[in-house]
Image (cartoon, rainbow, N blue to C red):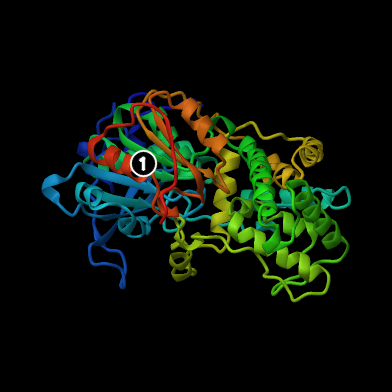
Amino acid sequence: MTLRNRRTIPVLTTAAAALLAGLTPATAFAAADPLRPYERQQLRWERCEAGQPTGFECAKVKVPLDYSHPGDRQIDIAISRVKAERPQQRHGVLLTNPGGPGTPGLSLPVELAPLLPAQVREQYDLVGFDPRGVGRSAPIGCGLTADEQTVLHPYSPVTFGQDVARARSVADKCREKAGDVLPYLTTRNTARDMDLVRAALGERRISYYGFSYGTYLGAVYTQLFPERTDRFVLDSAVDPALAWRGAFRGWSAGAELAFTRWTEWAAARNAAYGLGATPAEVRRTFWGLIAAADRKPVPTTGQALSGDAIREQYAAFVYVETVTPWIAALKAAAVGGPPAPAEPAVPGAAAEPGAAAESTKAKEAAEVPADNAVAMAWAVMCGDTRSWPRDPEQYRRDAIRDRVARPLAGDLVAGIQPCAFWQKAIEPATVVDSRVGALIVQNEWDPRTPLAAAQGMRRALHGARMVTVEGGEGHGVLVSGPSCADGDITRYLTTGRLPAQDQTCGPTAG
């Protein structure tokens, strides 16, 4: 199904129009414009919750579940805002998204406010929202067990049958619990929701700051609504051409580059860590540890770790200063030393966008299913595209091949997933090929969206500019601490001026 915007959706029948009567008076309904009642709805703002700043307001925006039949079922999208600090200098709204998919974004205006410079806070209403199916926006759940909520599974011919059964069970449970809404929980529809939020806020255009998956959501919006796109910052970007199986497999490629860099860093500090005097020696030490841990799991302060469990921490290798002492501690514990930490420290993890979502979710535990984040992640990643292989043997072959090519994590991310058994997507994946201006900012060493992914986003957005923080570590440039990209972000959001060309800059000490 191709996009049907408000000019091309078929005219609603009288009966369908009547279903919108609760939204706006029936007399306001224009037969040739079936989304008009949604665009003209009046929002009721209230203080979000006790304990939050008094200026942090929440409201709900009604949107159609199915945009091809907007007169049918409606759902509520929870939105929030912190108003511009200087109304007389207000430029508009800065809509935000923390990533995911499946991560609530209602608290993001409060989380981001301290990180944004005063000039930006003065000019924008910071607006957050829980995407459809997430948090307070008609959340779904599939009743998944803890094992069914795990994503990474090392390939083994012994356990592959169990992996197939687990993936099939997730798809079956989600179809049983939420099959009536799953087809509509897609990035394209969330982008359409964003446009109705824009209209309900009375804005002609919107600006946007999206992290991680939020960069893909932002790019899809620019493709569907280019004339309503203002200043878009895409921080730690996904390659839209790889959504979504290609993105999974791209993680292991990025991990190999980070691992190679780490061996060089650790070798230069062999006197401190004793992992090897050359990168080749460090590599042999690591793989020797993995083999030993597969024979006898390494004692830690938590659960003992097998070699596969250690490999599951592949993303930590971008943080050379914290992963190195962890590997050294595991090496010592494997030969009788004290238990190692259960996992490596991740600098700034609490500051990543959406980090406050867990506390919000805990407060709403009675309303939001415990597996909401995972269920929504699969709903989006499986429902966005029809390109997931349907043959389990394809996943087996890919896992074997990728483990050889990228041994650190190749099989972990190439293995079979619930999308192999998901119901067919009702729309094709969005082809992003936009000339809208946008600013892409990217750390060179990002554990979740590798540099190559951001470069793919840059190729898809012909009017964009990209700033790469050389040596920058962490997921999310804005939340990783002061960097050389901060000035470009501020300048673009406050003036609309993009850098004259793509650029690479050095990190600034925080």
Tally of marks: 1
Residue 38 sits in quarter: top left
Q: Residue shown at 64%/31% (left/top)? A: 387
- Extreme front residue here? 271
Task: Please say if 147 is above or below 279.
Answer: below
| Direction left: furthest residue | 88
Q: Is residue 152 above or below residue 350?
A: above
Q: Is residue 304 left or right of residue 264?
A: right
Q: Which residue is mark 1?
A: 194
Q: Which residue is at a point 84% across and 52% down the rendered structure image?
A: 159
In what element is the residue under mark 1?
helix
| Residue 343 rendering spot, x and y as whole percentages | 65, 65
Image quadrant occupied by the C terminus? bottom left
Rendering quarter of residue 324:
bottom right
Residue 127 versus residue 191 in the image, above or below? below
The percent position of residue 224, horizontal first and vertical second, equals 40, 29
Q: Residue at x 68, y 44 (%)?
A: 260
Circle 1 crowding by C-alpha within 10 Å: few under 14, some 14–19, many from 20? many
Query: Quick one: 187 or 111, which is closer to the camera?
Result: 111
